[in-house]
Amino acid sequence: MAITPEPGSGEWARYWQHAELPDLDLLRARYVRHAFPRHSHEGYVFGTITHGVEDVGLPDGTVHAGPGTVVMINPEVPHTARAGVPEGWVYATLYPSAQVVNDIAADTTSLRGTVGFTETSVVDPYAARLIRAVHRAAEEGNTLAADTVLRVMVTRLLGRHGSVLPIRTPRSAGARDAARARAVLEGRMAKPPGLDALAAELGTSPFALLRAFKKEYGMPPHAWLTDARVRAARRMLDAGTAPAEAAVRVGFTDQPHLNRHFTRIVGVPPGAYQRERARTYKTGPERPT
C-alpha cells in the first residue's frame, strides 16, 4: 500500500498491526512532502531513521534525527514531524501501548508506576537495529521473535533512559479549566461549542482558556479536538465502521475531511489504515508499493 500525495513524490507508507500483537502498531514509510501536524499518542513512540533526516518538533525543541538515531516519545506528548532534508526520510516506527511498556518495565526493571523516557533522541545503532528487527519479524509472521525483540529493545532503552513519570494533577485554576474544557470537548465531540461559548460555560474568558489549554496540552482546543476526533475514528475503523460513517460520528463534515486530517496525523488514509490492520505478509519483508 502506498500514499502518493503528489505524482512523482516517491512517498510510500504502511501502517499496520500484526494480528497476534494487538497492542503494537507498526509504521514503515518514506515521506518527502508530507508533514505531521501537532498531535500526540495514547501510547509510546519508538522510531528510527534508515535514510534522510526527520525533524521532530517537541515541547523542548526540534530533534534532527538521522540514521542510527532512536526517537522516543512518551504518551500524550505533543509533537510534529517533517522532512529535515530535501530528499525526505525513511523510517520504521513502533507504537506499543502504555500497558505493554509498563508491563515490560515491571518485569525487567525496578521502575514502578507509569514509566517514561528522559531523552527524546539518542544515537543508538543497536536499538535502531532492534526496531527494524521487530518489523522484519512481524512482516514474516514470526510473532515470537517480534515480541521477544520488542521486549529486549524496550528493556535496553528503559535501563539507559527510563524514569517514572510524575503524576500530573491540575493545580492552578487555569489548569483545572483546561481539564474541564477537555472533558466537554470529549463529551460533545460531534457538536462541540465554540471557544466563546465554551469559556462562558466554564466561567472564564476565551483568551484565558486558550492560554491555559495550550499550556496544559501543548496545542489549542481546536487542534486538540481534531487529534481526538482522529483517535476516535481510528477506534471505530478498528471495530469495522466504514470511514464515511466514522467521519460523521466523530464530527467531521464528511469523509473527505476525515481523509485529510487522518492522513496528516496518522500518515496513511483511513481506508488504507483499515485494510492493513490485521494483514500479515505470507512471505519475507518487502517494501510497500
Image: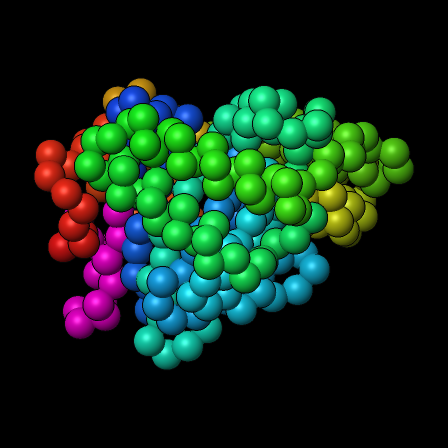
Q: Is residue 11 magenta?
A: yes
**Residue at 40 percent of width and 30 percent of height:** 148
> Can residue 20 be found in the magenta stretch?
no
Q: Nearer the viewer, residue 16 or 124?
A: 124
Q: Which residues are magenta?
A: 1-14
Q: Position of residue 92 (x, y in %)?
A: 36, 52
Number of numbered discs? 0
In this rendered view, identify the residue nearer to me: 275 or 106. Answer: 106
Q: What is the residue that sits farthest to the left in this orientation?
A: 283
Answer with left or right where residue 10 lies relative to residue 116: left
Residue at point 82%, 32% (across, down): 170
Q: Position of residue 256 (x, y in %)?
A: 28, 46
Q: Is residue 281 left or right of residue 65?
A: left
**Residue at the spot 33% in from the left edge and 45% down from the top edge:** 133
Which of the image's four quarters has the C terminus?
Answer: bottom left
- The answer to whether residue 186 is above or below residue 261 is above
Measured along the vertical axis of the image, is residue 91 above or below residue 195? below
Q: How is the image coloured?
A: rainbow
Looking at the image, residue 74 sits to the left or right of residue 92; the answer is right
Q: Which quarter of the figure has residue 279?
A: top left
Q: Write down the quadrant of residue 6 in the picture.
A: bottom left
> Looking at the image, which is closer to me, 238 or 66?
66
Q: Position of residue 206 (x, y in %)?
A: 75, 47
State whether residue 225 appears in this view: no
Q: Quadrant of residue 192?
A: top right
Residue occupying the point 42% across, 42% down: 94
Which residue occupies the extreme bottom position in the image? 86
Image position, residue 127 (x, y; %): 47, 50
Residue lying at the far right in this picture: please name it: 172
| Secondary structure that dominates the magenta span | loop
39 and 182: which is toward the camera: 39
Residue 142 in view, yes or no: yes
